[in-house]
Image (cartoon, rainbow, N blue to C red):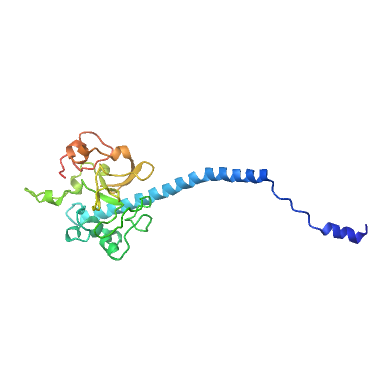
Amino acid sequence: MTGQSCIRESLRPAQCKGFTLIELLVVIAIIAILAGLLLPALAKAKGKAHAITCLNDVKQWSLACMLYAEDNEDQVPEEGNTTIPINQAANADAWYNLIAKTVDQSSLVALYTSGSPPLPGDKTIFSCPAAPRPKFNPAIGKAYFMYGMNGRLCINKGTRAGPPPIPNTKLVGITKPSDTIFIAEADGNSPTAGVAQSNVTGQYAVARHEGRGQFAMCDGSARAIRLKDFIRTSAESNNASEEWKASREVYWYPTATTPN
């Protein structure tokens, strides 16, 4: 063989050898194992991020409510009349319409009127990223709420009218402000047909974040609370003295004598 032919032989590309079936199966198995390890960790991190966002939302709403109280003889805002559309005159002073501007948010009526109802994942503090999608078409007549004001903190307008007339709850009169709920997560897909639940009680509160709900309290703080610590029976949810018979992690009624 001449030197020139030797050079030509050395320049020929080596034949490519493909993967065997066994090698491919091993690679696929390794990828599956890695995915099985990583996906739960990613899901957990996503859940943590959702919980942090939700906690920040309810805290901002509670601070807005406290600012409202400072300008209104220390009284808490109105929870809203859930039996009528959100744009009715009786709901003009509801928390979701009146105090939204305090935290640089459009009122809920304004959002619905503009065709931008808050939905899960939207960049607004009306929205909890972990909330389920609405099972109905949100509209002025039936809004979709992901957060609600504590319905036992605000005394119903009809009850306040008397006789005798009584004032709404005042922050200064709350027995345990750091343990009394102001804003909580709400079930936007309320089973009550035709009703937009802008308020929450211990009977219907939800825990969307690994068995915990995100709550803002009447002292401006916020924290995650286990379902068993905030859920109430029908009797406890509808009567202050019943709830206050036992020592609680948190309270819905601001005092043991607060009416509905």
Image coordinates of residue 196 in percent, x first then y, are 25, 53
Please indicate whether residue 94 sits to the left or right of residue 1 in the image.
Answer: left
Question: What residue appears at the point 82 percent right and 59 percent down from the top-left corner?
Answer: 11
Image coordinates of residue 61 in percent, x first then y, are 29, 53
Image quarter (top left, top right, bottom left or bottom right) of the N terminus: bottom right
Give the vertical position of 86 relative to 177 (above or below): below
Please indicate whether residue 10 sits to the left or right of residue 29 in the image.
Answer: right
Residue 260, quarter of picture:
top left
Question: What residue appears at the point 17 percent right and 61 percent down from the top-left corner?
Answer: 89
53, 143: nearer the viewer: 143
Image coordinates of residue 200 in percent, x first then y, are 25, 47
148, 101: nearer the viewer: 148
Give the vertical position of 241 relative to 51 (above or below): above
Image coordinates of residue 169 in percent, x first then y, are 17, 48
Question: What residue appears at the point 20 percent right and 34 percent down from the top-left corner?
Answer: 245
Farthest top residue in view: 246
Residue 93, quarter of picture:
bottom left
Image mark count: 0
